[in-house]
Each structure stands twice: as structure tokens, then as C-alpha cells.
Image: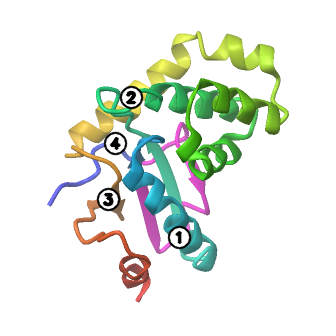
């Protein structure tokens, strides 16, 4: 069984309280991956229903060889994070995954009323690329070879079968 090699830290995007959560769920995801798109509403429902018990962390694992807009999506999400809207962008991209392209990403920036000049500047800096690369490399070191890959309390979760019931088993 693989373990999470890079502990959750201050550079991670987290929903919930990492210190009090019974379950820390880390997802390595790709915004264009159809399986991640399928898991998105299940994860969202799970963290809403078990908010007191779960902390959710999302890390970028863009499969650029397979998905044309994976890196652009990750970069836009990280840039939105610099304006305090990572999760809003994360949700907006996944909610519109079937229309993913450059225009859609620009539309997301507008919809979230982000500072377009700041976004354009931020996506060209090495900071965001370094963050995405660090997420990806941490995933590789942890045994991630596809998306979505989940870790539950630092252990790779091999039992996720694409259903909501598999999430429920985590808390029962």
C-alpha cells in the first residue's frame, strides 16, 4: 500500500480543519480527466455531509499527454487561489468540464469577477508552475499513476470504485 510522501502543508488547498478531522482525504486530480469529473460531485457531497469529520485537500496532477487543457486549468485554478477563489474556480471548472477550452477558462475568470490583469500576470510566473510541479512530483513519489487518486489519512485508497457508497464506507 502506498503512503502519502508529502504531508499536507501550508501550500495545500484545504476544505475543513486538518487538525480536528477524523478523515483527511487528499485527491490528486486532473481537471480534464473524465473520472475526476465523475468523482467531483461525489467528493463534494461527501465533504458537505461529513463536514465536521473530513478535511479535503486537492492537489494538481495534470496528465498533459492525455488532456490538452489540464495544465491551463490547473494554472487558472492556482491563479484564482492567489485571489482567494481557488475552490470557486475548482468547482466551476469541474462543473463545466464538458465545455473545457481556453474560452471557457476565460469565462470562469469573468464569472468569478477576478482581476484579469493579475490572472494574466500570475499565470506567466514560475510560482504557479512550481506549485503544480511540486504537487505532481509529490504524487509520483506517493505512487500516483492515474487520476483521480485518493489518500485517506496518508494511505493510498485502493477501494474507491466510482460510487458514493465507497466514500460512505470511510466514515462508517
Judging by the rendered image, the residue that carries numbered circle 3 is 154
Which stretch is magenta? 8-27
Sequence-earlier tag: 4 or 1? 4
Sequence-earlier tag: 4 or 3? 4
Sequence-earlier tag: 4 or 2? 4
How far apart in space, not on screen, are marks 3 and 1 (Cα)?
A: 13 Å
Above or below, 111 against 91 in this view is above
How many other residues sit within 10 Å of disc 3, few (<14), some (14-19) or many (≥20)?
some
Q: Are marks 4 and 2 in contact (CB under 8 Å)?
A: yes
For label 1, the SS is strand
Judging by the rendered image, the residue that carries numbered circle 2 is 134
Q: Which residue ends up furthest to the bottom in the rendered image?
A: 172
Q: Are marks 3 and 1 in contact (CB under 8 Å)?
A: no
For label 3, the SS is loop
Above or below, 168 against 59 in this view is below
Above or below, 165 against 162 in this view is below
Which residue is located at x 71 percent, y 20 percent?
119
Nearer to us: label 4 or label 1: 1
Q: Which mark is residue 54?
A: 1
Say which quadrant the N terminus sits in: bottom left
Sequence-earlier tag: 1 or 2? 1
Which residue is located at x 70 percent, y 47 percent?
88
Residue 5 image offset from top left, x and y in percent: 27, 45
**Residue 162 left/right relative to 1:** right
Res. 99 visible in picture: yes
Q: Are marks 4 and 1 in contact (CB under 8 Å)?
A: no
Amino acid at each position: 500500500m502506498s503512503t502519502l510522501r508529502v504531508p499536507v502543508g501550508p501550500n495545500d488547498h484545504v476544505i475543513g480543519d486538518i487538525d480536528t478531522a477524523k478523515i483527511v482525504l487528499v485527491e490528486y486530480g486532473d481537471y480534464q480527466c473524465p473520472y475526476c469529473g465523475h468523482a467531483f460531485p461525489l467528493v463534494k457531497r461527501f465533504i458537505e455531509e461529513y463536514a465536521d469529520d473530513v478535511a479535503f485537500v486537492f492537489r494538481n496532477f495534470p496528465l498533459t499527454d492525455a488532456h490538452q487543457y489540464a495544465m491551463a486549468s490547473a494554472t487558472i485554478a492556482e491563479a484564482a487561489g492567489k485571489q482567494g477563489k481557488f475552490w470557486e474556480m475548482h468547482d466551476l471548472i469541474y462543473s463545466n468540464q464538458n465545455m473545457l477550452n481556453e474560452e471557457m477558462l476565460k469565462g470562469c475568470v469573468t464569472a468569478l469577477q477576478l482581476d484579469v490583469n493579475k490572472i494574466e500576470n500570475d499565470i506567466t510566473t514560475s510560482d504557479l508552475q512550481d506549485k503544480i510541479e511540486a504537487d505532481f512530483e509529490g504524487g509520483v513519489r506517493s505512487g500516483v499513476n492515474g487520476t483521480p487518486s485518493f489518500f485517506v489519512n496518508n494511505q493510498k485508497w485502493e477501494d474507491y470504485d466510482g460510487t458514493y457508497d465507497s466514500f460512505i464506507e470511510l466514515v462508517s
